[in-house]
Image: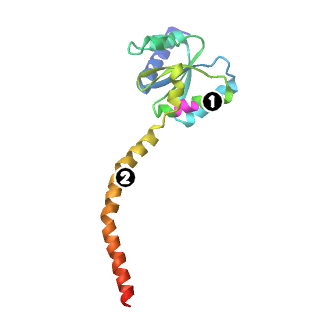
Amino acid sequence: MKREQKEARIKELADIFKSDGTFYLFDYNKMSVAQSVDLRKTLRKHGSSLKVVKNRLALRALKAEFPDALRGSFRKPTAVAFTAADPILLAKALKEFAVQNKVLVVKGGVVQGQYFPAERFDEITKLTSRQALLGKIGFMMAYPLTKLLRTWQAPLTSAGILLSQLKNKKQ
Protein backbone atom coordinates (compact mmCIF):
# COMPACT_ATOMS: atom_id res chain seq x y z
CA MET A 1 0.00 0.00 0.00
CA LYS A 2 1.41 3.38 -0.98
CA ARG A 3 1.89 6.24 1.47
CA GLU A 4 -0.98 8.29 -0.02
CA GLN A 5 -3.34 5.33 0.31
CA LYS A 6 -2.27 4.81 3.91
CA GLU A 7 -2.81 8.48 4.74
CA ALA A 8 -6.24 8.40 3.12
CA ARG A 9 -7.15 5.26 5.09
CA ILE A 10 -5.91 6.85 8.34
CA LYS A 11 -7.97 9.97 7.67
CA GLU A 12 -11.04 7.86 6.89
CA LEU A 13 -10.65 5.87 10.12
CA ALA A 14 -10.07 9.04 12.15
CA ASP A 15 -13.30 10.50 10.74
CA ILE A 16 -15.17 7.31 11.67
CA PHE A 17 -13.80 7.28 15.20
CA LYS A 18 -14.50 10.97 15.69
CA SER A 19 -17.85 11.50 13.97
CA ASP A 20 -19.79 8.35 14.79
CA GLY A 21 -18.93 8.22 18.47
CA THR A 22 -20.00 4.58 18.72
CA PHE A 23 -17.99 1.64 17.49
CA TYR A 24 -17.19 -1.89 18.60
CA LEU A 25 -13.98 -3.78 17.91
CA PHE A 26 -14.07 -7.50 17.34
CA ASP A 27 -11.90 -10.36 16.18
CA TYR A 28 -13.05 -11.81 12.88
CA ASN A 29 -10.29 -14.42 12.56
CA LYS A 30 -12.53 -17.52 12.29
CA MET A 31 -15.23 -15.87 10.19
CA SER A 32 -15.83 -17.16 6.68
CA VAL A 33 -16.52 -14.90 3.71
CA ALA A 34 -20.19 -15.93 3.65
CA GLN A 35 -20.55 -15.09 7.33
CA SER A 36 -18.85 -11.75 6.78
CA VAL A 37 -21.25 -10.88 3.97
CA ASP A 38 -24.19 -11.95 6.13
CA LEU A 39 -22.93 -9.77 9.01
CA ARG A 40 -22.53 -6.77 6.72
CA LYS A 41 -26.11 -7.20 5.44
CA THR A 42 -27.44 -7.46 8.96
CA LEU A 43 -25.58 -4.35 10.07
CA ARG A 44 -26.76 -2.37 7.04
CA LYS A 45 -30.37 -3.13 8.03
CA HIS A 46 -29.68 -1.45 11.38
CA GLY A 47 -27.98 1.59 9.83
CA SER A 48 -24.49 0.43 10.76
CA SER A 49 -21.33 -0.46 8.88
CA LEU A 50 -18.36 -2.78 9.17
CA LYS A 51 -14.72 -2.18 8.27
CA VAL A 52 -11.76 -4.50 8.50
CA VAL A 53 -8.80 -2.41 9.58
CA LYS A 54 -5.05 -2.71 9.75
CA ASN A 55 -4.08 -2.33 13.39
CA ARG A 56 -1.16 0.02 12.77
CA LEU A 57 -3.27 2.37 10.68
CA ALA A 58 -6.12 2.28 13.18
CA LEU A 59 -3.77 3.10 16.05
CA ARG A 60 -2.45 6.08 14.12
CA ALA A 61 -6.03 7.20 13.49
CA LEU A 62 -6.97 7.12 17.18
CA LYS A 63 -6.64 10.47 18.84
CA ALA A 64 -5.33 11.12 22.34
CA GLU A 65 -8.89 11.47 23.68
CA PHE A 66 -9.42 7.70 23.47
CA PRO A 67 -8.16 5.68 26.46
CA ASP A 68 -5.04 3.53 26.32
CA ALA A 69 -7.11 0.44 27.11
CA LEU A 70 -8.76 0.85 23.71
CA ARG A 71 -5.38 0.91 22.03
CA GLY A 72 -4.67 -2.49 23.58
CA SER A 73 -7.65 -3.95 21.72
CA PHE A 74 -5.90 -3.54 18.36
CA ARG A 75 -4.09 -6.86 18.42
CA LYS A 76 -4.75 -9.81 16.12
CA PRO A 77 -7.12 -9.32 13.17
CA THR A 78 -9.53 -6.51 13.99
CA ALA A 79 -12.77 -5.30 12.48
CA VAL A 80 -14.72 -2.22 13.46
CA ALA A 81 -18.53 -2.06 13.50
CA PHE A 82 -19.70 1.53 13.76
CA THR A 83 -22.90 3.51 13.73
CA ALA A 84 -24.13 7.06 14.03
CA ALA A 85 -27.60 5.79 14.93
CA ASP A 86 -28.63 3.79 17.99
CA PRO A 87 -25.60 2.06 19.62
CA ILE A 88 -27.82 -0.44 21.42
CA LEU A 89 -29.24 -1.80 18.14
CA LEU A 90 -25.71 -2.31 16.83
CA ALA A 91 -24.66 -4.13 20.01
CA LYS A 92 -27.74 -6.35 19.88
CA ALA A 93 -27.12 -7.17 16.20
CA LEU A 94 -23.50 -8.13 16.94
CA LYS A 95 -24.55 -10.22 19.95
CA GLU A 96 -27.22 -12.02 17.92
CA PHE A 97 -24.72 -12.78 15.15
CA ALA A 98 -22.15 -14.00 17.69
CA VAL A 99 -24.68 -16.34 19.30
CA GLN A 100 -25.83 -17.76 15.95
CA ASN A 101 -22.42 -18.26 14.35
CA LYS A 102 -20.05 -18.58 17.33
CA VAL A 103 -17.19 -16.87 15.48
CA LEU A 104 -17.39 -13.29 16.67
CA VAL A 105 -15.26 -12.22 19.66
CA VAL A 106 -15.85 -8.66 20.86
CA LYS A 107 -12.69 -6.92 22.06
CA GLY A 108 -14.25 -3.72 23.36
CA GLY A 109 -15.76 -0.54 22.08
CA VAL A 110 -16.74 3.06 22.52
CA VAL A 111 -20.37 4.00 23.11
CA GLN A 112 -21.04 7.70 22.63
CA GLY A 113 -17.48 8.57 23.60
CA GLN A 114 -17.19 6.25 26.62
CA TYR A 115 -14.92 3.19 26.52
CA PHE A 116 -16.44 -0.22 27.34
CA PRO A 117 -14.21 -3.30 27.68
CA ALA A 118 -15.28 -6.65 26.26
CA GLU A 119 -16.49 -7.82 29.69
CA ARG A 120 -19.16 -5.09 29.75
CA PHE A 121 -20.47 -5.78 26.25
CA ASP A 122 -23.29 -7.95 27.59
CA GLU A 123 -24.44 -5.04 29.77
CA ILE A 124 -24.83 -2.89 26.68
CA THR A 125 -26.91 -5.52 24.88
CA LYS A 126 -29.31 -5.71 27.84
CA LEU A 127 -30.09 -1.98 27.72
CA THR A 128 -33.29 -0.65 26.21
CA SER A 129 -33.05 1.16 22.90
CA ARG A 130 -33.23 4.94 22.71
CA GLN A 131 -36.65 4.97 21.05
CA ALA A 132 -38.15 2.72 23.72
CA LEU A 133 -36.74 4.98 26.45
CA LEU A 134 -38.15 8.07 24.75
CA GLY A 135 -41.52 6.34 24.53
CA LYS A 136 -41.42 5.55 28.25
CA ILE A 137 -40.50 9.15 29.09
CA GLY A 138 -43.35 10.43 26.92
CA PHE A 139 -45.79 8.09 28.63
CA MET A 140 -44.55 9.12 32.08
CA MET A 141 -45.00 12.79 31.19
CA ALA A 142 -48.46 12.33 29.70
CA TYR A 143 -49.87 9.95 32.32
CA PRO A 144 -50.37 12.50 35.15
CA LEU A 145 -52.08 14.89 32.73
CA THR A 146 -54.34 12.12 31.46
CA LYS A 147 -55.20 11.13 35.01
CA LEU A 148 -56.00 14.77 35.90
CA LEU A 149 -58.21 15.12 32.83
CA ARG A 150 -60.13 11.96 33.75
CA THR A 151 -60.56 13.23 37.31
CA TRP A 152 -62.04 16.51 36.04
CA GLN A 153 -64.31 14.69 33.61
CA ALA A 154 -65.65 12.24 36.21
CA PRO A 155 -68.13 14.66 37.88
CA LEU A 156 -69.46 15.79 34.50
CA THR A 157 -69.86 12.20 33.35
CA SER A 158 -71.58 11.29 36.61
CA ALA A 159 -73.88 14.30 36.32
CA GLY A 160 -74.78 13.29 32.77
CA ILE A 161 -75.56 9.73 33.85
CA LEU A 162 -77.62 11.02 36.79
CA LEU A 163 -79.65 13.35 34.54
CA SER A 164 -80.23 10.51 32.08
CA GLN A 165 -81.50 8.25 34.86
CA LEU A 166 -83.79 11.00 36.17
CA LYS A 167 -85.22 11.51 32.68
CA ASN A 168 -85.87 7.78 32.29
CA LYS A 169 -87.50 7.65 35.74
CA LYS A 170 -89.94 10.48 34.92
CA GLN A 171 -91.00 8.83 31.72
Q: How crowded is mark 1: few (under 14 residues within 10 Å), some or many (20 or more)?
A: some
x then y, percent, for residue 60: 46, 10
Magenta stretch contains residue 144 = no
Give left or right: position of 122 versus 104. left
Q: Residue 11: give x, y in percent of width and height.
A: 45, 17
Where residue 92 sits, quadrant-wise, is: top right
Q: Mark 2 points at which residue?
A: 143
160 up-or-down from 90: above or below: below
Q: Is residue 111 left or right of residue 45?
A: left
SS of the residue at dot 2? helix
Q: How far apart are marks 2 and 1 (CA)?
A: 38 Å
Q: Residue at 36% across / 89% down in the picture? A: 170
Q: Is residue 7 visible?
A: no
Q: Which of 76 and 8 is in front in this view?
A: 76
**Quarter of the N terminus within the rendering:** top right
Task: Kindly identify the amino acid type of the residue bearing the numbered disc 1.
Answer: Phe
Residue shown at the point (42%, 22%) measured from the top left: 114
Bounds of the magenta span? 89-93
Q: How many marks?
A: 2
